[in-house]
Image (tube, rainbow, N blue to C red):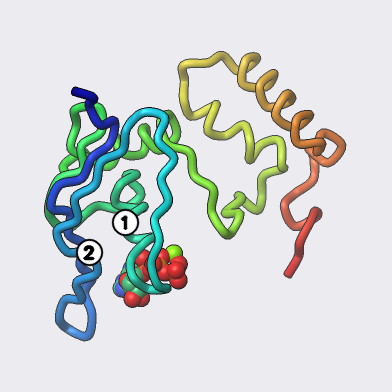
């Protein structure tokens, strides 16, 4: 039988609200298999982002299990979650979340530098390649505020 690469069992997420608790996710079971392309659909405010945050170690579920590579993300220390976020999970946010005082080059390179498995030269080469692929090499020394959409 195929093993899920990511699974949730009885996942619950509540937030403190007006002195009480507001329950956003209630006993969610979920399985993701290698090669899957999965879409989470639901009304605005139904908890899609909250679910994604809990499944990816961005936030911690209130109860239940999130199993990734044999480890429960709900119980994993913050340091372990931080490492997973830059080694194993990729995020594309609606907002860019760029570091405003770092250049575009530096913003792209930061996860590579944090993940000490690659040398500085390798990270630099990979960053240059990504900049080229995205056709933004010519603005790599710009700050985020100096490019693109400034709404
Ligand atoms: N940190 C928080 N504290 C309190 N309530 C929160 C918090 N984060 C989210 N919520 C509430 O949880 C509910 C689900 O929010 P969530 O952002 O997960 O919805 P969503 O399905 O992603 O919505 P959208 O389609 O608008 O992106 C909302 O009612 C939201 O107000
Ligand atoms: Mg959302």
Q: Position of residue 122 (x, y in %)?
A: 62, 15
Q: The N terminus is located in which quarter? A: top left
Q: The C terminus is located in which quarter? A: bottom right
Q: Which mark is residue 51?
A: 1
Tell me the distance, in whole angstroms, between the alpha carbons under discs 2 and 1.
Answer: 7 Å
User: Which of the two residues, 71 or 97, is positioned nearer the viewer here?
Assistant: 71
Q: Quadrant of residue 67?
A: top left
Q: Position of residue 75 (x, y in %)?
A: 16, 42
Report the image quarter containing ligand 2. Answer: bottom left
Seen at 60% across and 50% down, the residue is 99
Task: In the rendered view, tell whether residue 38 sits above or below residue 20.
Answer: above
Q: For the residue with label 1, is its CB less than 8 Å from the closest atom of ligand 1?
A: yes
Whether residue 30 appears in this view of the structure is: yes
Q: Position of residue 51 (x, y in %)?
A: 31, 56
Seen at 17% across and 83% down, the residue is 19
User: Which of the two residues, 102 or 151, is positioned nearer the viewer here?
Assistant: 151
Task: In the rendered view, tell whether residue 44 sits above or below residue 132.
Answer: below
Seen at 46% across and 16% down, the residue is 117
Counting other residues with Cα less than 10 Å from the Cα at mark 1, is it few (<14), some (14-19), or many (20 or more)?
many
Mark 2 residue element: strand
**Left-right relation of 18 to 103:** left
Q: Which mark is residue 92?
A: none
**Left-right relation of 121 to 47:** right
Whether residue 74 appears in this view of the structure is: no
Counting other residues with Cα less than 10 Å from the Cα at mark 2, is it few (<14), some (14-19), or many (20 or more)?
many
Q: Which mark is residue 25?
A: 2
Q: Upstream in the sequence, badge 2 or badge 1?
A: 2
Task: In the rendered view, tell whether residue 4 sits above or below residue 119.
Answer: below
Seen at 23% across and 24% down, the residue is 2
Q: Residue furthest front?
A: 1
């Amino acid at each position: 039988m195929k093993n899920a690469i990511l699974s949730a069992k009885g996942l619950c997420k509540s937030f403190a609200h007006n002195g009480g608790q507001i329950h956003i996710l209630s006993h969610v079971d979920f399985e993701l298999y290698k090669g899957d392309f999965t879409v989470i659909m639901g009304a605005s405010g139904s908890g899609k982002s909250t679910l994604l945050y809990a499944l990816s170690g961005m936030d911690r579920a209130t109860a239940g299990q999130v199993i990734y590579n044999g480890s429960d993300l709900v119980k994993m220390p913050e340091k372990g979650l931080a490492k997973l976020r830059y080694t194993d999970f990729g995020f594309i946010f609606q907002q860019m979340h760029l570091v405003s005082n770092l250049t575009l080059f530096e913003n792209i390179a930061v996860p590579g530098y944090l993940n000490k498995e690659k040398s500085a030269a390798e990270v630099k080469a990979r960053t240059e390649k990504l900049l080229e692929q995205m056709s933004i090499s010519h603005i790599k020394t710009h700050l985020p505020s100096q490019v693109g959409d400034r709404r």
